[in-house]
Image: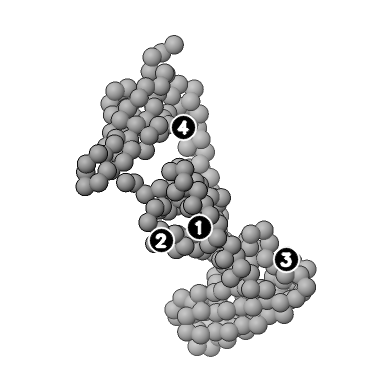
Amino acid sequence: MDANLEYKEFSGKTKDDAITNACQSFLVASDCLDYVVIDEGSSGFLGFNSKPVIIKARVKSDEEIAKAKEEAAKKALEEEAVKVAAKEAKEQASRIVENVTGVSSDKKASDVDIEEVAVKFLKEVLKAMDVEAEIKTELNDEELSVELSGNDTSYIIGKRGQTLDSLQYLISLVINKYTDKYIRVKVDTENYRERRKQTLENLARNIAKNVKRTRRATTLEPMNPYERRIIHSALQGDKYVETHSEGEEPYRKVVISPKRG
């Protein structure tokens, strides 16, 4: 077996330093490296008693490198396809909005009743979903609040609020075509947003306790930006853990990890 295919230990002041040392030893680029973190190290106190980050690393086989390049190329093609689709969707958005609401997107903001446009659009969407709901709106300078009520609220909310978020996003796209300044949209039903917020805050605190105890990071399930902000905010002042997000949308996740030192 090629010696480079066997794991060897490397250390560095940071993880990046350890990876660099491994690359220099194997004479390969970082994308050809397979590694696992053995010890996350510690910055110590004022630089004293610091511990280096330790990793185990090896060079990927030719087959692994070829597969990784293939996956990277596939991802690049998918991202390009998404960009093309987004451009086409944007070009069609005006026509769709005009057909649904009966309001031309060329109209000036001062001539358009934003709440009326939102209600007309939402009624058509709910009709297509075969959902009946009462719609109440309230508009101020910076936000349009939409409250839905009825017997089909579980369908409106969807799994972890995904349907509610989609409705909120679509309404935002529609109304902001007629506004001079950006207006935030908040769609809610049965006080779901507040209940979900409390659930996520409790989840964040419980996981933080476990991270403090085990000194091991925990990665949460993928969440939308709004829910990730709730987790970050809930633990912002914690002395023992810190949070960051990683990954690409819509699979971006929050990582809760122990603070160094």
Q: Residues within 10 Å of mark 3 (few under 14, many from 20)?
A: some
Element on which disc 2 rests: loop
Residue at figure coordinates x 54%, y 74% from the top left: 185
Which residue is nearer to you in this view: 180 or 126? 126
Q: What residue type is labelled 2?
A: Gln
Which label sits on residue 154? 3
The residue mark sitting in front, 4 or 2, is: 2
Is 250 placed above or below 130 here? above
Q: Position of residue 44 (x, y in %)?
A: 27, 43
- Which residue position is annotated with label 2? 236
Q: Which of marks 2 and 3 is nearer the N terminus?
A: 3
Element on which disc 4 rests: helix
Which residue is nearer to you in this view: 172 or 233? 233
Q: Residues within 10 Å of mark 2 (few under 14, many from 20)?
A: few
Is 109 placed above or below 238 here? below
Using residue 2 as the reference point, say whether residue 104 is left or right of it: right
Q: Position of residue 200 (x, y in %)?
A: 55, 60
